[in-house]
Image (spheres, rainbow, N blue to C red):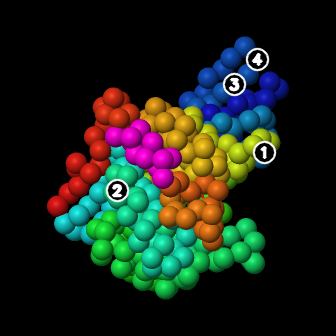
Amino acid sequence: MVVVMAPDATDEQIAHVAERVESVGGQAFVSRGVVRTIIGLVGDIESFHGLNLRTMPGVADVHRISDPFKLVSRQHHPDRSTVWVGPKGHQVPIGPDTFTFIAGPCAVETPTQTLEAAEMARAAGATLLRGGAFKPRTSPYAFQGLGVRGLEILADVRETTGLPVVTEVVDARDVAVVAEYADMLQIGTRNMANFGLLQAAGEAGKPVLLKRGMTATIEEWLMAAEYVAQRGNLDVVLCERGIRTFEPRTRNTLDISAVPIVQSTSHLPVIVDPSHAGGRRDLVLPLSRAAMGAGADGVIVDVHPDPEHALCDGPQALFGADLRALAQAVRQLPPVLGRVDARERIRG
Ligand code: PEP
Ligand code: MN
């Protein structure tokens, strides 16, 4: 932390700042310039926060130098992490050496629709199945998901297809039941800053897929991940899913630079959701290619056997030739960039 003193700060004011810093066990390095004095602080940053440095006479500004997150930071853990998803005997990696393709319906609607979507996903090369049983809808009148019945369907489909399941939890009260069925808990964009939910997910004993809040900065997103990590769960995968901008042609604007920024700041894996970013089927392939090119550790996409009759997000769901084209890109592009297909690294 660096304290910048005002040009007219007195020697007493400078000494007062240094004394207060030392009173909480820190060290203050005073550097006197021609016009201004700056004081570099070394020590426990949280104890400096408690000093209210900004309110002290003669203090013009206070700057934080290190990142506010710790457990998810690469300073804490220099090597990038791999998160393993699935039951013992069939764990799928999401991390720096592999490329993980996750696909499935936006929402679980019926057993047949979910199974068909899962078969499509598997045939396209996906190693994990996505599908919402609890749906966080903007409108309270829209389909809210099948709830626990949807979780049962996902478990049955996992049994049939062998694909571990990632599904969303929208309420801290449901974490236990979702964790009972799911292999990975998804926290959606609307709940990224629901700190009680993040803490509950951090205690559930399952990996967490944490989507970026649609208006969240990268730092806020990583602080949300820190909430999960602080509860003892470092198995967090981040998912860039587009942010709100002024552009109405897409549902959200995919922030592709978030991928390398997160990877240089945090050790956690980061994947991209091109379906919820663009909200348009025709954009899923180009946005997926962009994600692969930017170095994402995977993609998560919506597929549906009959998008026209989908109860949720039909316009972005892939099927037929579009899904085949994406499957081909996933086979071809990541190896060029030095990654192996997650299917080849499944841990038995
Ligand atoms: C979803 O993946 O089904 C979903 C609702 O995504 P998001 O939270 O990114 O909108
Ligand atoms: Mn959706």
CA–CA distance in space, label 4 to label 3: 7 Å
Judging by the rendered image, the residue that carries numbered circle 2 is: 123
Q: Specify few, some or many for label 4: CA neighbours under 10 Å numbering under 14, 14-19, or 20 or more.
A: few
- Decide: is 106 above or below 282: below
- Decide: is 180 above or below 247: below
User: Tag 3: residue type?
Assistant: Thr
Query: How far from the left and from the top, in percent, is residue 330?
Result: 39, 41
Return the mark for residue 35: 4
Q: Is residue 325 visible?
A: yes
User: Which residue is rendered at x = 55% and y = 65% of the image?
Assistant: 306
Quarter holding residue 56: top right
Q: Nearer the viewer, mark 2 or mark 4?
A: 2
User: Tag 4: residue type?
Assistant: Val
User: Tag 2: residue type?
Assistant: Ala
CA–CA distance in space, label 2 to label 4: 68 Å
CA–CA distance in space, label 2 to label 1: 34 Å
Residue 149 horizontal side relative to residue 65, left or right: left
Q: Quadrant of the N terminus?
A: top right
Q: What is the secondary structure assignment of the residue under circle 2?
A: helix
Judging by the rendered image, the residue that carries numbered circle 1 is: 248
Q: Between residues 172 and 142, which one lies in front from this camera angle? A: 142
Q: Nearer the viewer, mark 2 or mark 3?
A: 2
Query: How far from the left and from the top, in percent, is residue 102?
Result: 42, 55
CA–CA distance in space, label 4 to label 1: 49 Å
Q: Is residue 52 visible?
A: no
**Which of pointers 2 and 4 lies earlier in the amino acid sequence?**
4
Q: What is the secondary structure assignment of the residue under circle 4?
A: loop
